[in-house]
Amino acid sequence: MAGVRFAAVTAEVSTGTSVKTIVQVVAASNHRILIDRATVTFQGTSTTDAPILVEMLRQSTAGTMSSLTPVKLNSADDETLQVTARHTATAEPTAGDVLESFLVHPQGGKEWLAPFGRAIVVPGGGRLGVRVTAGVSVDCVVSLHGEE
């Protein structure tokens, strides 16, 4: 680990009304990453819509998604980021262990911060996704912050 901090941030993504992975980060082979912050915000318009299930989970396959380029939080860092990311699943990745789970109102958002020393470890070649299950389709934005 070089201590290079990164962020993988999506543009607005429609949740649809079934399970959908919004973002997935992939650790480079033999190069683990630590995820210590995640934010999910929704752009709902109705106060009576049911909460949306948000899950952070391990995923064992890529599914079908678009490429997303993570960025260094300190642009002066010399190292090249090895982590990659994808967004907006059109075919869902294979789900693994759910590590965090939240119910979030479609007009709100949620920030998750890892307790000190308890970041989520994504082993080399591993994948971590944020997926949502919504009863109504709303736009959302997801940010994952971590270190490699």
Image (tube, rainbow, N blue to C red):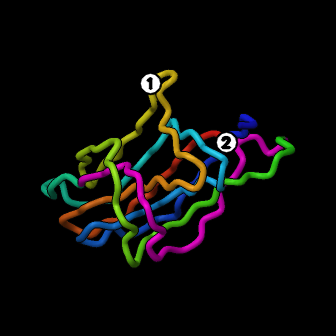
Q: Which residue is mark 1?
A: 115
Is 56 placed left or right of 31 in the picture? Answer: left
Q: Quadrant of residue 145?
A: top right
Displayed quadrant of residue 73? top right
Q: Which numbered circle lies on residue 70? A: none
Horizontally, residue 72 falls left or right of residue 48, namely: right
The stretch of residues the image draws in magenta is 53-76
Residue 69 belongs to magenta span: yes
Compared to residue 73, the image places residue 89 above or below, namely below
The answer to if 40 sits in the magenta stretch is no
Q: Residues within 10 Å of mark 2 (few under 14, many from 20)?
A: some
Residue pictured at 19% horizontal, 52% vertical: 51
Residue farthest to the front, as pictured: 30
Viewer-proximal residue, 75 or 84?
84
On-image quarter of the N terminus: top right
Q: Position of residue 102 (x, y in %)?
A: 27, 44
Residue bearing the label numbered 2: 148
Residue pushed farthest top?
A: 116
Judging from the image, what secondary structure is the residue with disc 1 in?
Answer: loop
Rendered location of residue 77, percent (x, y): 82, 41
Residue 50 horizontal/vertical position (percent): 15, 55
